[in-house]
Image (spheres, coloured by chain):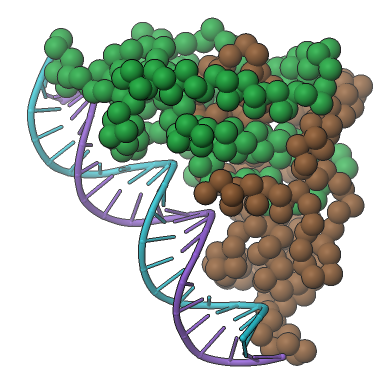
Chain colours: A brown, B green, C cyan, D purple
Amino acid sequence: MIYQGVYYGGMTSMPQPHHRIAFLLSQLGSDAASGFEQALQSLNITASDAGLLRLIGRTPGVSQRVLSKQVGVGPSRIVAVLDRLEDRGLIERRRSRTDRRIHEVGLTEEGEEVLAGIRPLAEAHERSYTECLDPGEVEVLQSLLGRIAASRGLSIDIHRGTTADGNDSAGRADAAARKAAAH
Amino acid sequence: MIYQGVYYGGMTSMPQPHHRIAFLLSQLGSDAASGFEQALQSLNITASDAGLLRLIGRTPGVSQRVLSKQVGVGPSRIVAVLDRLEDRGLIERRRSRTDRRIHEVGLTEEGEEVLAGIRPLAEAHERSYTECLDPGEVEVLQSLLGRIAASRGLSIDIHRGTTADGNDSAGRADAAARKAAAH
DNA sequence: TATTGTTATACTCTATAACTATA
DNA sequence: TATAGTTATAGAGTATAACAATA
């Protein structure tokens, strides 16, 4: 998946000597995303699936509406995605007894296993990005990237979770809003 | 465009404390790409268009086949993209007199103007990523990102251009190959 | 009336295979 | 026969609107 190795519109050489950071980030980000995607193929899931499984694992019984907002795939698209995961036996849908409009989504045992398989892949993937740096450099890089993310209004808060109403308050929403505004 | 703010499959919180670099890169890279895309809207072009205009400006009379390889959009897709740019009066197609199968693609005057308009936008975009850092930090970041890119086999060579046969030998080809292998 | 899940539709990018005209 | 450009088709993602069941 990922479906777009953007690289500033496919430019393969540097735009200008002075525009390196944004370009490098774009290039590396695309590479990181597709590399992770590739790693997940051993579990036969996409990065989008992985995000979904993580969310469901963290908040069992979550509704499709909430998942849709969290993952940013749109309420109609989430249907097909969950259909596929359900067909594969990784998730279950149950009608809520307190509100019969809602499907409560949870992981099956097999879903839990697949979820558990994601972490080592993510760790190996992370190592492939940091193995060329020493620990001090990794920290510096993390700090610099974190500051840029913060200055761009992207949330990098580990502890930011799901709010009661299922809205995630920060980064993704911003990104979605920007994207929406761009069209 | 960009059409996918990937973020590791829409995950909005950090995967794990130890997986920060790859995740941050993915997040920032997506943000950088969509931010650039957004900036280009003032010129009414996409990032892909911008890459194309740059290539054409650098190598006037280039064939569609070469453009297709360089930009990585596929020989059939390039047709529609160039059609649109031609309809907008930004590029011209001319049949080559030495090989009448070939369309030589060049910029119109208006195309040159649009191309000239890209640079200030790219500069402003770059500034929006580096303004939170001091010059020394920018250099450090550049160096660290460059090392990661190199260790991942991504070409970051400014001078890498078009080879005689129109193949670009490094980064993009790798990425394309990886992506292809992923399906 | 509003909301959840769902279906249907339209649009865009991708990938592939065929077709044409040239070589 | 091989190649450049083109066309056509199928696939997957996005976005939107409409719908049934439920609140």
**Which corner quadrant of the image does residue B56 belong to?**
top left
Frontmost residue, A139 versus A69: A69
Q: Name the residue located 84 percent from the left edge and 69 percent from the top edge.
A: A164
Q: Is residue B49 left or right of residue B140?
A: left
**Which corner quadrant of the image does residue A17 belong to?**
top right
**Which corner quadrant of the image does residue A79 belong to?**
bottom right
Image coordinates for residue A39, horizontal then vertical, percent: 66, 42
Residue farthest to the right? A136
The answer, for residue A6, to whether it is visible in the render is no
Q: Name the residue located 68 percent from the left edge and 75 percent from the top edge.
A: A92
Frontmost residue, A150 versus C20: A150
- The image shows residue A151, relative to residue A141, as above or below, that is below
Count of numbered labels shown in the rendering: 0
The answer, for residue A153, to whether it is visible in the render is yes
Image coordinates for residue B23, horizontal then vertical, percent: 75, 39
Image coordinates for residue A26, horizontal then vertical, percent: 63, 30
Image coordinates for residue B127, horizontal then vertical, percent: 70, 23
Q: In this view, does B140 lie to the left or right of C1?
A: right
Q: Name the residue located 69 percent from the left edge and 81 percent from the top edge.
A: A102
Q: Name the residue located 57 percent from the left edge and 33 percent from the top edge.
A: B39
- The image shows residue B148, relative to residue A55, as above or below, that is above
